Amino acid sequence: MLRKLLIGTALATSFAFSAHAADVKEVQMLHWWTSGGEAAALNVLKGDLAKEGYAWKDVPVAGGGGDAAMTALKAMVAAGNYPTASQMLGYTVLDYAAAGVMGDLTETAKKEGWDKSVPAALQKFSVYDGKWVAAPVNVHSVNWLWINKAVMDKIGGTEPKTFDDFVALLDKAKAAGVIPLALGGQNWQEATMFDSVVLSTGGPEFYKKAFNDLDDASLKSDTMKKSFDNLAKLVTYVDPNFSGRDWNLATAMVIKGDALVQVMGDWAKGEFHAAKKTPGTDFLCYRFPGTDGSVIYNSDMFGMFNVPEDRKAAQVALATATLSKSFQSAFNVVKGSVPARTDVPDTDFDACGKKGIADLKAANEGGTLFGSLAQGYGAPPAVANAYKDVVSKFVHGQIKTSDEAVTELVKAIDDAK
Amino acid sequence: MSTVATTQIKLTPERSRPTVRARLQDALPKIVLAPSFAITIVFVYGFILWTIYLSFTNSKTFPSYVITGSRAYQRLWGWTFDTDPPSSWYTSITNMGIFGFLYILICLALGLFLAILLDQKIRGEGVLRPIYLYPMALSFIVTGVAWKWFLDPGLGLEQTLHQWGWTSFHFDWIKNKDFVIYTVVIAGVWQASGFIMAMFLAGLRGIDGEIMKAAQIDGATTFQLYRRIVIPLLRPIFLSAFIVLAHLAIKSYDLVVALTSGGPGGSAWLPSNFMYEYTFKRNEMAVGSASAVIMLMTIVAIIVPYLYSELREKPR
């Protein structure tokens, strides 16, 4: 019995060691892109790396979704068992960099000219203390309207240019008996829509002050109150069954023509593509009324960990491949986002993608590229989630007036800071 | 212990070989148990202490080991009285009260009732029993998703009844911030009451039939029989069922997530959701730890007096 036990222990230890000693020609990647379009997009990267002789190894995460992956990452890092890279969002990269576990890709960045090609607003998250610690994969933007063209034609609507136009358009849809606004009543979706409402109501300067600088005066200003009133107005156009709905189900309502419009980030385009719809003929993409010229972004990044020397070559190969123009184009065509560098040709993109690329470039040059607070690019997670709480409680009626909402918003953000 | 063994050896040196063997045999259970004992000490009690420690630091994304005082508790205490609009913590603890109370009460009542009915020597008990018991075999996630679809006004019960012609039927609790927690109770009760029934059924089968007969001869009605004799005799089962249900109630994090994804405006949160949300999503590990400590204290405050009062009477 004792011998069996010893053999068992020996086996277990050898397994543990073999799992630990990572192959130097291997890229260990933690991510949650497992569903159709995203997985397909990632295959492009796997192919690119295979050409250079690097094998791809997914770090398994039980239970899908970004939260589970982040919990797994925390455990891996705490155990000193770093993956080559991990999909990460916004402030998470900076948190890990501050903890001193991120690698340094500055040399590669210099060689590849990332400083010039990656928008400055993005570099705030991919560069820590002068060192490149992450490779941005894409830029999503959240201030989009996704409209079913058939429904739009039926009600005789045109592109809304102002918030009032938008309300008039929603009224038309209501009169025609379709659900005007498809919304999923989960806090991040409500807050994502509110990002756009605030930008539309207060303009770019105001958005930046309130949601990126967290300026108290702006947060409790009348403009913010007005924004909450506008949000309340939009919420009157959703169907009674909206609460708790997933975002892709809301997109499906627009695709099927049950609803006219959804306010959602450009990942919604992936759903339209999956349903074999083409922009311009089946669906329309407009900037949220009153936000043309500005882009509220979020971005997926591959955070690069401080792996042992012998694994660094694989890491550099991964980072270089990630920011190569060919991958940026191929990946983002599938994903629905736009490239994280502004010098990628837009030839392969559809109409919405071309507009997205042009808008990003213009916003980058004009200084109107802002991080989305709802998506964790405006402030650290504690603040962003406090914000989502307040917006969601306002939408669902726990907070009853815009006055109260503003007071609560300031209180919640101060408390979380 | 070892001194006893050495004295034995000194007293009987000629039988030292069997003694070593006997000592080994003596110690074997302890050696075998030692790993699991050590694991429990470290991974349960050790981490409880670690959590308590963290709750007094200012840990954010990662644990920090510098004690900075009780700010996390002060914030929780402040939120406890933030009722308008309800803070997430206030929502969580009131929901825990509502959910815990109704869940345990209804499960016990329903379980006992079903067990009594099944105990009437009816035909087909062997078929009926597993039907009630099997929901327990499902994970909370499966239960949550199934009930989410069933209770969704646009998909499940309401929609179906509308299609059958009962168009005035209205049941949208799962979308309603004030009632969503009761849908968690419904799903939870559905899952656990069959198991509680099985526990009570085992208890009922253990009751001596002679007592029942004696009571019937004395002219006790069926109600009196159960009220005065059967239920008091089932007291140990109540204790076991209560403990099982209490810990199921406190750990039912996944049910809330799968069924309501937090509910409208976070109105279905339980303290476990609060703890996970703050520790892992908001990077406020200290607050998360403090809430975990308060959960633990609450359980201790409820379970310990109950266990004490129940177990003290045993030697009687």
Image (tube, rainbow, N blue to C red):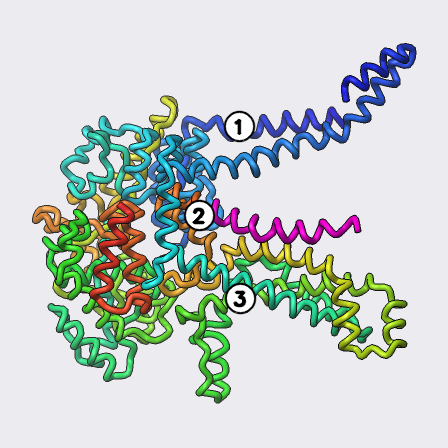
Which residue corresponds to mark 1? A18
Q: Which residues are magenta?
A: B291-316
Which residue corresponds to mark 3? B185
Under mark 3, the amino acid is Val
Position of A215 compared to A69: left or right? left
For label 1, count other residues whose C-alpha is less than 10 Å away and answer few (under 14), some (14-19) or many (20+).
few
Q: How far is the residue under mark 1 from the one under mark 3?
A: 47 Å
Q: How far is the residue under mark 3 from the one under mark 2?
A: 22 Å
What's the chain of the residue with tag 2?
A: B
Point 43% across, 32% down: residue: A78
Where B180 falls versus A105 (above or below)? below
Under mark 2, the amino acid is Ser
Residue A254 seen by the camera: yes
What's the chain of the residue with tag 3?
A: B
User: Of helix, strand and loop, which one carries label 3?
Assistant: helix
Kindly indicate the quadrant of the structure image that contains residue A285: bottom left
Q: How far is the residue under mark 2 from the one under mark 1?
A: 39 Å
Instruction: Decide which of B210, A201 is in the foreground and name it.
Output: B210
Which residue corresponds to mark 2? B291
Q: Mark 2 or mark 1: which is in front?
A: 2
Kindly indicate the quadrant of the structure image that contains residue A54: top left
Q: Main secondary structure of the magenta part?
A: helix
